[in-house]
Image (tube, rainbow, N blue to C red):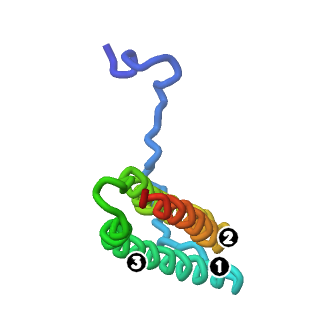
Amino acid sequence: MSSSALLPTGWGSYISPMQPHQPAPQMQPYQPHPKVKESAGRQADLVVSIVLTMLYGTAMGLIWFLSLFLSAFATDSCGAQTCRYEYLAWALGITDIGGGVVLLAVLIAVAVRLGRRRTAWWIPLVGIGIQVILMAISLQLIEQIPG
């Protein structure tokens, strides 16, 4: 039995793609994509977004630090029997945990929008606005602590 008898029909004249008279294909050097110049508006959005996000993060850190002392000072004006400590717990939870959730959401949203090359300068401003609302709610609860 010949070797061509083992091949399927039509394969008897199979020729290797690398024939001796053909030179080996040449490898082309890597050509990176040309750099696209960022527009001035895009650069300004990037800088403003980062600065506002850092400002909000710093303010949130200050709020967390001050809330350590808030629990002591908020209950100074009341006696042990007349304080409503549940309002203090809610006030600190709204400010600290709620603010942390908003800060995390701002960080993620800014990163995603900047990664997609979309404007993101307004996101930290929305976060700061939400934080101001959370602080106002928290202060209203703190005023209710003394019985």
C-alpha distance separating marks 1 and 2: 6 Å
Measured as percent of width and height from the top left, residue 91 is found at: 44, 58
Q: Is residue 114 visible?
A: no
Say which element carries label 1: helix
Residue 45 tag number: 1
Q: Give the mark nearer the N terminus: 3 vs 2.
A: 3
Residue located 40% across and 60% down the image: 92
Say which element carries label 3: helix
Residue type at tag 1:
Asp
C-alpha distance separating marks 1 and 3: 26 Å
**Which of these two is toward me, 123 or 20?**
123
Residue 132 tag number: none
Marks 1 and 2: CB-CB under 8 Å? yes
**Which of these two is toward me, 126 or 31?**
126
| Horizontal relation, residue 66 to residue 51: left or right | left
Say which element carries label 2: loop
Q: Give the farthest residue toward the top.
A: 1
Measured as percent of width and height from the top left, residue 120 is found at: 63, 70
Say which quarter of the image contains residue 136. bottom right
Residue type at tag 3:
Leu
Residue located 48% across and 78% down the image: 54
Q: Which residue is mark 2?
A: 119
- In front: mark 1 or mark 3? 3
C-alpha distance separating marks 3 and 2: 27 Å
Q: Which residue is mark 3?
A: 62
Measured as percent of width and height from the top left, residue 79 is found at: 31, 61
Measured as percent of width and height from the top left, residue 61 is found at: 39, 74
Residue located 37% across and 69% down the image: 77
**Which of these two is toward me, 47 or 106?**
106
Question: Badge 3, how many Cα within 10 Å: few under 14, some, many 20+?
Answer: few
- Image quarter of the C terminus: bottom left
